[in-house]
Image: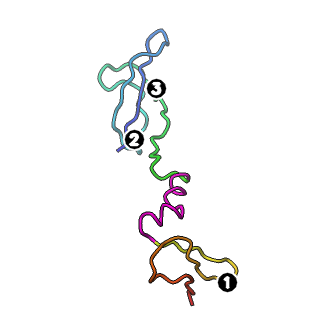
């Protein structure tokens, strides 16, 4: 379940204590603090994104040098002929061209 951040609204309208609460996404947003009964507002947070698989990281991991260094063979499809040509890899048993037919 997601954790939402709320902030207490003080009687003078200023911002008060910040707290987190675990709620279902189906639950309505809180309007009052569950313990003190004070009015609250939801504080929107930026999403927690994992940067493990960014486009730049994927590009560097699948670069010809890195693929070859790890012992794999990489093929790239020729858009005209539909064949796959070996672009990286030192395996002598791996063919230079693969025909999908």
Callout 2–callout 3 Cβ contact below 8 Å: no
Q: Nearer the viewer, mark 3 or mark 1?
A: 1
Residue 13 circle label = none
**Front: mark 2 or 3:** 3
Residue 81 disc label: 1
x%, y% of residue 43?
47, 29
Q: Is residue 82 above or below residue 43?
A: below
Query: Is 100 drawn above or below residue 35 in the view shown?
Result: below
Q: Which mark is residue 27?
A: 2
Mark 2 or mark 3: name the one nearer the start of the chain: 2
The magenta stretch is: 56-72
To which residue does mark 3 refer? 41
Can you name the residue that lies furthest to the bottom here? 101
Marks 3/1: CA–CA distance: 60 Å
Residue at x 34%, y 20% (from the top left corner): 37
Left or right of 97, for residue 8: left
């Amino acid at each position: 379940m997601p954790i939402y951040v709320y902030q207490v609204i003080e009687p003078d309208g200023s911002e008060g204590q910040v707290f987190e609460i675990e709620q279902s996404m189906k639950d309505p947003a809180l309007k009052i603090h569950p313990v003190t009964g004070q009015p609250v507002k939801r504080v929107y947070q930026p999403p927690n994104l994992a940067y493990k698989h960014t486009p730049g990281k994927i590009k560097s991991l699948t670069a010809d040098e890195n693929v070859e260094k790890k012992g794999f063979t990489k093929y790239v499809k020729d858009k005209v002929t539909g064949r796959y040509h070996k672009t990286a890899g030192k395996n002598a048993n791996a063919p230079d061209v693969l025909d999908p037919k």
